[in-house]
Image: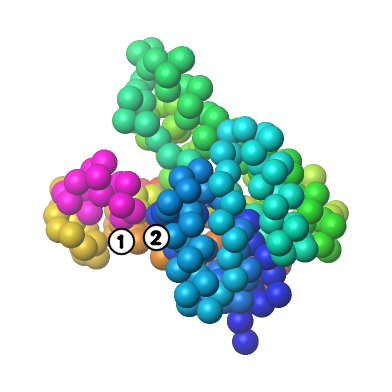
């Protein structure tokens, strides 16, 4: 028996990283997938992989920072699948130019970071949650960060955006519970996505091409367990998306190898 059988999931940023892993996993568990991605090549590739594996997926080019684009993407998903049950807000990320509040470039860094992380989640919730309610209820999963729980110096703007996601998650959970919509956040630690490998280099993941699950290198010493793979976060999102987690809403779940506990 599949865990998401009969459900339709709208997943942002699904052309790469955690969101792509989640899209493929959700499809294997029976969900039909709306692949919402700004990059046409990677988004189409994710949808194609899902179809090749026997699943159902539609790529919809989506800029989550533009309300018209989000509205059109939501409408396209409804035309294709007839309903929406799950929203996974995974598009986002930090900028290498991020820094301390006294020095960071507000025009270049603040605006873009807040748009892609916070505004994107707000716009998708604005347009998808009513559709989830119309389908009888479901789940919203927001991608936050361990930075929201402990701060990430010197990434002050990214920390502010991801902290806002946690607060937004709790507000949404309280507001939409009567519509049978659960809203939760995942506070991920360092994950070995293609983007992060480029950003941190091999040393940031245990010193090699694969994750050092003993956390032996200096760069990962703050992770008592280990840094993660995209599938590690996708598995948590799967649980939150499905009915097994029906008693959980308004939660901000740390998934950072124990870093936030120390």
Asked if the residues shown at circle 2 and circle 1 are in contact, with their CB atoms under 8 angstroms apart, the answer is no
Is residue 77 left or right of 28 when viewed as pictured?
A: right
Is residue 159 left or right of 214 when viewed as pictured?
A: right
Q: Calculate the distance from the C-alpha at mark 2 to the C-alpha at mark 1.
A: 16 Å
| Residue that appears at 18% across and 59% down | 209
Is residue 80 left or right of 215 when viewed as pictured?
A: right
Q: Is residue 196 magenta?
A: yes
* Residue sitting nearer the eye, 52 or 6: 52
Q: How many labels, in total?
A: 2
Q: Quadrant of the N terminus?
A: bottom right
Q: Position of residue 68 (x, y in %)?
A: 69, 35
| Residue that appears at 45% across and 15% down | 106
Instruction: Report which residue position mark 1 lands on.
Output: 225
Q: Secondary structure at mark 2?
A: helix
Is residue 193 left or right of 20 when viewed as pictured?
A: left
Instruction: Report which residue position mark 2 lands on.
Output: 230
């Amino acid at each position: 028996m599949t865990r998401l059988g009969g459900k339709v999931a709208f997943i942002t940023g699904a052309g790469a990283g955690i969101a792509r892993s989640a899209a493929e996993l959700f499809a294997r568990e029976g969900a039909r997938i709306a692949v919402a991605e700004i990059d046409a090549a990677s988004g189409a590739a994710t949808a194609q992989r899902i179809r090749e594996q026997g699943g159902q997926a539609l790529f919809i080019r989506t800029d989550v920072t533009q309300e018209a684009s989000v509205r059109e993407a939501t409408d396209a998903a409804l035309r294709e699948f007839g309903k929406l049950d799950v929203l996974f807000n995974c598009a986002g990320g930090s900028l290498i130019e991020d820094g301390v509040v006294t020095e960071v470039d507000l025009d270049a860094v603040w605006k873009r970071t807040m748009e892609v992380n916070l505004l994107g989640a707000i716009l998708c919730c604005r347009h998808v949650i009513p559709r989830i309610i119309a389908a009888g209820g479901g789940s919203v999963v927001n991608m936050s960060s361990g930075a929201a729980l402990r701060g990430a110096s010197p990434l002050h703007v990214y920390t502010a955006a991801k902290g806002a996601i946690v607060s937004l998650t709790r507000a949404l959970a309280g507001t939409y519970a009567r519509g049978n919509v659960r809203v939760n956040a995942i506070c991920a630690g360092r994950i070995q996505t293609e983007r992060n490998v480029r950003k941190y280099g091999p040393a940031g993941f245990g010193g090699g091409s694969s994750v050092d699950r003993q956390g032996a290198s200096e760069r990962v010493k703050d992770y008592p367990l280990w840094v993660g793979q995209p599938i590690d976060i996708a598995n948590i999102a799967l649980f939150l998306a499905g009915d097994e987690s029906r008693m959980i809403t308004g939660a901000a779940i740390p998934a950072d190898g124990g870093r936030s506990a120390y």
